[in-house]
Amino acid sequence: MRARYGIPLKITAGIAAVGAAGIAYAAGFEARSFRLRRLTVPVLPKGMRPLRVLQVSDIHMVSGQHKKRAWLQSLAGLRPDFVVNTGDNLSDPQGVPEVLDALGPLMEFPGVYVFGSNDYYGPTLRNPVRYLFEKAQGRHGLNGNPPAVGVVHNPWQDLRDAFDTAGWVGLSNSRGRLKLEGFELAFTGLDDPHIKRDRYEKVAGGPEKDADLSLAIVHAPYLRTLDAFTADGYPLILAGHTHGGQVCIPFYGALVTNCDLDTDRVKGLSTHESSGNTSFLHVSAGCGASRYTPVRFACPPEATLLTLVEREE
């Protein structure tokens, strides 16, 4: 017996079964298969001891995600020198208490943070095929426009207040500092470029001369922000947002980055060049996904422990 277009029903059923199995794997196993990426980055001046930096990103917390909460809490056992949170903590307006519970042990360490669009606005239900097509065509973000009518506004102020109370330094279009055992660390951050909240003119000027190390922090690694940070001479830029492509093809990689960054640099450590300068760029694949597309394929959720060491001569 044949279905329309001459395709046997058995083959159609087989394709459907394989697709269903793939979705079950992506949502049921891989999306909860949390990993720790470890990297070494040579950016410190001579004489500084190595620094251990834990980057968490794109948590997209939804109420009831107990395994994700427990895994995030366990990262405190790494004893980092400081924590960098590159945004998109929420995917549920009710998720603030669970984010704070998950990050509670990490908030005992010094830290800095920026927000992403999902900290401000709740996600919307979208056709995933249309999403992939739009991103492949280079259509990104809200283009600076207000979100559509009916979009939920997340209680990001509650997150901000809790992070600030814990001593974490907010870097939304601002600069900040941390002191670690006699070392002075400076940070320059931007609000989320994905919704055009970035205002580089407010923080332009490059690394602070009296700091031992200056780092650049942003949620979405749009090229305009990477160009600006690199041209100003920052040795390392930390970002998130891409989810590592989220749904990747084995032995090929990501199809989209959800911004104008190329797919070759969708996650992990790479470099960026601008105005004759070169910066290291680390893009976290993050540890979550939108509540409406809670899948990952060939791209496990992750956090990253970066060990910063002396620059190579």
Image: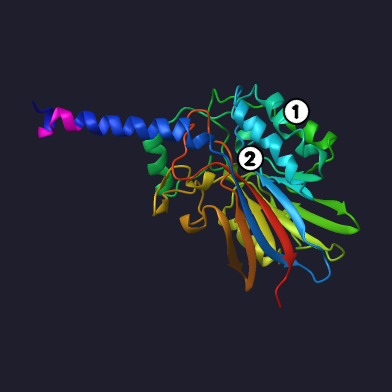
116 or 74: nearer the viewer: 74
Find disc 2 in the rendering and name its residue: 116
| Quadrant hosting residue 106 | top right
Q: Where the N terminus falls, by quadrant?
A: top left
Q: Where the C terminus falls, by quadrant?
A: bottom right
Q: Secondary structure at mark 2?
A: loop
What is the span of residues highlighted in magenta in the rendered image? 6-11
Q: Secondary structure at mark 1?
A: helix
| Quadrant hosting residue 168 | top right
Q: Main secondary structure of the magenta part?
A: helix
Q: Residue furthest bottom?
A: 313
Residue type beneath disc 1? Asp
150 or 164: nearer the viewer: 164
Q: Give the Cα separation between the discs numbered 1 and 2.
A: 15 Å
Packing grade of label 1 (10 A; few <14, some 14-19, many >=20) is few
Residue at 25% from the left image edge and 34% from the top image edge: 15
Residue type beneath disc 2? Gly
Question: Does 5 appear in magenta?
Answer: no
Q: Earlier in the sequence, mark 1 or mark 2?
A: 2
Q: Residue furthest right?
A: 182
Find disc 1 in the rendering and name its residue: 158
| Quadrant hosting residue 40 | bottom right
Q: Are marks 1 and 2 in contact (CB under 8 Å)?
A: no
52 or 278: nearer the viewer: 52
- Residue 271: horizontal and vertical position, in percent? 59, 64
- Residue 14: horizontal and vertical position, in percent? 23, 32
- Residue 7: horizontal and vertical position, in percent? 13, 33
Can the viewer see residue 125?
yes
Can the viewer see residue 202?
no
Residue at 56% from the left image edge and 46% from the top image edge: 285
